[in-house]
Image (cartoon, helix red, strand yellow):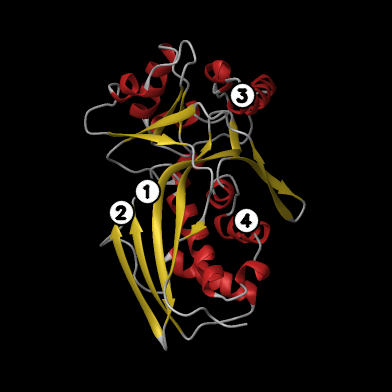
Amino acid sequence: MSFVRGEVRVSVPATSANLGPGYDSLGLALGLRDELTATTIHDGLEVVVEGEGAGALPLDESHLVVRSMWAGFGAMGIAPPGIRLHCRNVIPHARGLGSSSAAIVGGLGLARALVSDGPSRLSDGDLVQLAADLEGHPDNVAPAALGGFTISGREGMSWYAVSAPVDPRIRAVAFVPPYSLSTELARSLLPASVPHADAAADAGRTALLVAALGGAPEHLLTATRDYLHQDYRRPAMPESLALVDALRADGVPAVVSGAGPTVLAFLADGVPGLLAAADLRGRCPGGWVAHELDVDRSGVRVG
C-alpha cells in the first residue's frame, strides 16, 4: 500500500435532508459542488480555503476536511507524512445545504483517492458508515456520497443507506437567506414527543414522497407536507417558514432544507400545477439568493 503521486481532485455535492416529512431519513444531492484538491507532502499540514468559509474556517488539524481525511487514513491503516489541502467552497455554510456533510464526505473521498488501493480498502458502503459516524446521522452524508435520492437510518450498531430513483423531470430551486442557523439550535426546538396522529400523517407523507420523487411528481405538494419538525422550528426562522407557507399556498411543493434556514422548492417540467423555474426565481425574497439546481446523480467523485 502506498500513496499516489501528485495531486488528486475530488468534488462533492450539496444536499438537502428531510425534504419535509422524511425527518433524519431522506436526502437529495443537488448540483452545487465543493472542489477539494490534496497531495501528500514530506511533513506538516498546509490548508488553503477559497470561497465559502474563507477567513473563518480553521487552517489546522481541526478543519473538518482534515479531520475526515485522517479518519479515512486510519480506516485504511496508513498515515501520510504530511498533507497539502486546497478547498474551493461554493456550498453555503450553516444554511441547511449539507456543507458539513460535504466536508466529511469530501475529506474521506480525498483520503481514499490518495491511497493507491484506496477504493478496495474503503468501499462506498464503508465511506457512508464512517461519514455517518463522524456526522452523527446519515441523511446528508448518504446522498453526498452516493448521489441522487437516498433513504437512510440506523439499525443496531450500523447505518443503512439505500438509493431510490428520481424522476428526470424533477429539479429544485434553493432560496438561501443571508443569515445562518445552527443545526444544534434547530434541533433544540423540537419536542421530546409528538401526537400519534402527527406521526402517522408524517409516515404516510414520507412513503408518498418516495413515490412522488420516483415518478409521480404531481403528488409532490401533498407528499412534502410535514407534521414533525418544521412548525416547531418557526421561532428560529420565521422568514423561512413564511416563505414555505406562501409558496405552498400557491401550489408549490416547498420545504425547509435540512435544519434551515434555506427553503427548497420543487419543480418538474411538464407537470400541470407546478411553477416554472423563472416563476419560482421571481419569488425570491430581497437579499436572498435563488439557486436553480438539478438533482446530482453522481455523489462524491474524483477528477
At a point 44% along the width and 36% down the height, the residue shown is: 294
Task: Kindly check if marks 1 and 2 are in contact, taking CB atoms under 8 A apart as contact.
Answer: yes
From mark 4 to mark 1, how far is it between C-alphas? 20 Å
Indicate the amino acid at tag 1. Answer: Ile
Q: Label for residue 52? A: 2
Indicate the amino acid at tag 4. Answer: Val
The answer to which quarter of the image holds residue 274 is top left
Residue matched to label 3:
215
- Which quarter of the rendering shows the C terminus? bottom left
From mark 2 to mark 4, how far is it between C-alphas? 24 Å
From mark 3 to mark 4, how far is it between C-alphas? 26 Å
Packing grade of label 3 (10 A; few <14, some 14-19, many >=20) is: some
Packing grade of label 2 (10 A; few <14, some 14-19, many >=20) is: some
Residue matched to label 1:
91
Nearest-to-viewer mark from 3 and 4: 3
Task: Kindly check if marks 3 and 1 are in contact, taking CB atoms under 8 A apart as contact.
Answer: no
- If you read the primary sequence from the N terminus, does the residue marked by circle 3 or circle 1 appear first? 1
Q: What element carries label 3?
A: helix
Packing grade of label 4 (10 A; few <14, some 14-19, many >=20) is: many
Residue situated furthest bottom in the rendering: 42
Comparing 228 with 33, the one in front is: 33
- If you read the primary sequence from the N terminus, does the residue marked by circle 2 or circle 3 appear first? 2
Q: Where residue 28 sits: x, y (%)?
A: 53, 39
- If you read the primary sequence from the N terminus, does the residue marked by circle 1 or circle 2 appear first? 2
Residue situated furthest left in the rendering: 286
**Is residue 17 positioned above or below 207 on the image?**
below
- If you read the primary sequence from the N terminus, does the residue marked by circle 4 or circle 1 appear first? 1
At a point 58% along the width and 32% down the height, the residue shown is: 166
